[in-house]
Image (cartoon, rainbow, N blue to C red):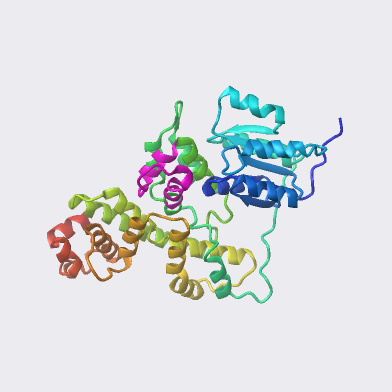
Amino acid sequence: MNAVVLPAVPRVLIAEADPWSRDLLKQVLLSVRCDARLDLCGDGQEALQQMTENPYDLVIVDWELPGVDGLNVLRSVRQRKRNPPLPFILMSSRNDSASVREALPLAPAAYLTKPLNMDSLTQRLQGLLLDAGEEVFCDVPPLAPGMTLSVYLERCRELADGAPLMTDVRLAVKRSLHPNGLDLTLLHDEIRTDPQITAVLIAAANSAAQHHGAAVQTLSQALHRLGSRQSMNLILGLALQHSARLSDPCLADYAERYWNLSLHTAEYARNLARLLDLDQERCYCAGMLHRLGDLALLRCLQEWKQAGGELDEWEEVGDALAEFGAAYGSALRTRWRLPLELRGLIAAVYQLGGGVYSREALVMNMAAQMARLTEHEGIEELAKSRTARLLKIGLPELMRLRIK
């Protein structure tokens, strides 16, 4: 038998309908081969078209694709009688023996059941894309000649991966694992203070592939809709993203400040909601997410520096946050299709528009004002504010909330 000769730079096609699962597969693959050329698509017909136009070294396809399903994509590939056969990973939520027997005659390189086992997937990819003992290292691509910071940030706005992680996700998952599997209640307590994880899980839970009725608006709801394995996979996948953690001290310091502001706003929102018998967890999530854009911008600034860009670490960072932070947040919330009601609560953190306000919107606005106060500074004025009057909250209640 002839030895398999691996390509210098592999080209891989990933066909997966759910955008969050597709991104997870992308991150896992790039963690194995950061130099891989990737093509992504969401339906079987497009996958077949891509394979007609491009020579691939590996194809990863979900059985449950719309249009032409993954099994028929695999069948079409085998009918072309390529030698050696194209490595093909077939994924499916079907784990019954009849489905496995149907796929095996078509000789997939692997048949992986969903939710995926990340370790198993990684090992399969390593076996298919790396020689024994081989590791691949990739440099950050340099900036285009003449690229300015302002143009770079404007281009990144619609492509940003989101905020840096503020939680050690591997430790969080490890501490939530028990002999019987992942404890979602413990996992929730570990990750609930991380804006990026909260936003991604809520967005993933509301994707078309997961849609089962009313929109998910809290982290707890997202975890239970996604289930333990898929939640764990998405969380671990975030840690694989480029610049997932901020290593630059100045940018990390900015992130810490914005994160603390989010935490304080979220806690005040939850306490106010409890006092007024409103939805505590939704108000908490809105508070956690309101600085998502600023944090995402800081992550892009780190990528700018890693690509060789110059950065005045105080003046330019502050100017960039002032100019682009809000736009980054708006772009992320829209692109990730966070529920409109949740977006409305986030917007209320910054200002109350005209018209009639919901009590939860008033809570978010009040919580943000409280989070910005220094100890006991301005609490009397806040008690006289229009927001306090509409909520019918006085100085005694606000003082009690400040003490907690």
Residue at the extreme top: 97
- Taking the magenta stretch, the answer to whether it contains residue 224 is yes
Q: Nearer the viewer, residue 143 or 99?
A: 99
Quarter of the image where one finds residue 370: bottom left
Q: Does the magenta portion include 356? A: no
The residue positioned farthest toward the right in the image shown? 2
x and y percent of residue 320 in the render? 49, 72
Question: What residue is at 60 percent from the left and 66 percent from the top?
Answer: 305
The image shows residue 319, relative to residue 126, as above or below, that is: below
Q: Does residue 30 show up?
A: no
Q: Which residues are magenta?
A: 199-227
Q: Quadrant of the N terminus?
A: top right
Q: Residue furthest front?
A: 67
Q: Nearer the viewer, residue 194 or 6?
A: 6
Residue 267, percent across and down? 29, 53
Q: Tell me, yes or no, if residue 299 can be seen here.
A: yes
Q: Nearer the viewer, residue 158 or 246?
A: 158
Q: Quadrant of residue 178?
A: top left
Question: Would you identify the image quadrant in which residue 303 lies?
Answer: bottom right
Left or right side of 387 for 240: right
**Count of marks, rendered view:** 0
Closest to the observer, 296 or 109: 109
Could you tell me which residue is drawn at 35 percent across and 50 percent down? 217
User: Magenta stretch mostly in which secondary structure?
Assistant: helix
Determine the residue positioned at 54% across, 70% down.
153
Q: Where residue 165 sits: x, y (%)? A: 48, 52
| 96 relative to 307, above or below | above
Residue 315 against residue 122 in the figure, above or below: below
Q: Position of residue 168 (x, y in %)?
A: 48, 46
